[in-house]
């Protein structure tokens, strides 16, 4: 896949912390990633192979809302924001709009879930 690079993380490595600038998104190829709340440290999701993470903050051009830690040794595909924008700009305008609408819906659902 163009623009992606393979990166590995040892168990216990923090990939990013809540509040960090968002520059990369990841597709987990092997291993387990814990996503935790930046304030309490509570693990609210455990990700496995095939899961993606970090995309919301990259798409929004913002900061990380969670901390990602390798729970086991992990192999990921990493894509920076420039690479993502290049992929999105190569797609049709309609698919780009649908993608952005789905992103907004996911962002709002996550906000509702965190408020509960």
Image: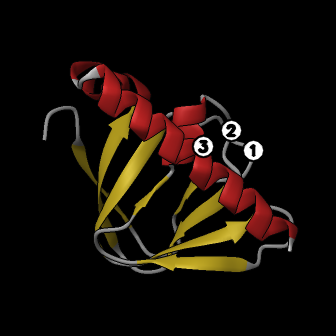
The answer to whether residue 81 is above or below residue 66 is: above
User: For mark 1, does the 10 Å Cα neighbourhood hold few (<14), some (14 to 19), or many (20 or more) residues?
Assistant: few
Residue 112 or 73: which is nearer the viewer? 112
The N terminus appears in which quarter of the rendering? top left
Q: Is 32 on the left-hand or right-hand side of 17? A: left
Q: What element carries label 3?
A: helix
Query: Residue 19's x, y, as percent?
Result: 75, 44
Disc 1: which residue:
19
In terms of sequence position, does the residue under pointer 2 or pointer 3 come before the other?
2
Disc 2: which residue:
63
Colouring method of the image: secondary structure
Q: Is 99 on the left-hand or right-hand side of 95? A: right
Residue 99 or 36: which is nearer the viewer? 99
Question: Nearer the viewer's eye, disc 3 or disc 1?
Answer: 3
Among the 4 quarters of the image, the one containing residue 5 = top left
Query: Residue 23's x, y, as percent?
Result: 51, 33
In terms of sequence position, does the residue under pointer 1 or pointer 2 come before the other?
1
Residue 35 at least partly seen: yes
């Amino acid at each position: 896949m163009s623009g992606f690079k393979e990166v590995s993380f040892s168990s216990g490595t923090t990939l990013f912390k809540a509040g960090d600038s968002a520059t990369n998104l990841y597709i987990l190829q092997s291993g387990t990633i814990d996503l935790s709340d930046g304030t309490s440290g509570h693990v609210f999701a455990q990700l496995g192979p095939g899961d993606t993470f970090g995309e919301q903050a990259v798409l929004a051009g913002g900061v990380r809302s969670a901390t990602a830690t390798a729970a086991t040794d992990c192999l990921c595909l990493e894509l920076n924001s420039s690479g993502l924008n290049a992929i999105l700009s190569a797609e049709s305008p309609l698919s780009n709009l649908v993608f952005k609408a789905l992103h907004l819906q996911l962002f709002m659902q996550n906000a509702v879930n965190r408020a509960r």
